[in-house]
Amino acid sequence: MQRNSKENSNRQSVILFADDDELCLDVGVKILQKLGYSVLQAHDGKEALEVFESNKDSVDLVILDMRMPYNGGRAFDQLKQIKSDVKVIIASGFAEDQRIRDMYDQGCIGFIQKPFSINVLSKKVSTALKN
């Protein structure tokens, strides 16, 4: 469902942030909230799928940790099955690898290296939401 620009300007963007590292999850959620986003959170890929399934019409962007239980790559594939136009940024403490590059061909719209600064996260999210 395409939202018109009036609807977009009248509500906060909703971001689902999934990471199994409690500290990273906590910091990421707090940064996104400070930036003015409404944030849903998940502790692994399976929980991310459950949260997304329940909120798929309101989630504007998903940020998935690549290496977590029920990993980001597997969760990404299933998110795309639930909603083909879902916007996903992959996060990882490791450098962007071939699997992540392959995910671009499947509709992944970005990659963010952990640890990330508030400025880098802000720019990545802003760019992703404009696409």
Image (tube, helix red, strand yellow):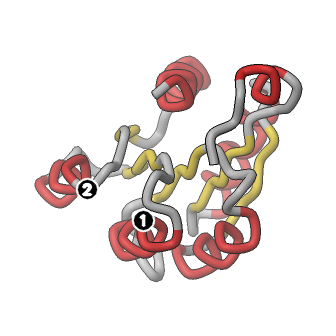
Residue 56, by quadrant, is bottom right
Residue visible at 48% across and 46% down?
87
Of 123 and 85, nearer the camera is 85
104 vs 34, left or right, is left
Tell which residue pokes out farthest to the left in this image. 98
Of 125 and 58, nearer the camera is 58
- Give the mark, 2 or 1, whose residue is nearer the N terminus: 1
Q: Which residue is mark 2?
A: 106
Residue 78, by quadrant, is bottom left
Q: Which residue is mark 1?
A: 80
Q: Position of residue 14 (x, y in %)?
A: 74, 44
Residue visible at 57% across and 62% down?
19
Q: Position of residue 100 (x, y in %)?
A: 23, 53
Tell which residue pokes out farthest to the right in this image. 10
Q: What SS does tag 2 mark?
A: loop
Q: Amino acid at mark 1?
A: Lys
118 vs 114, left or right, is right
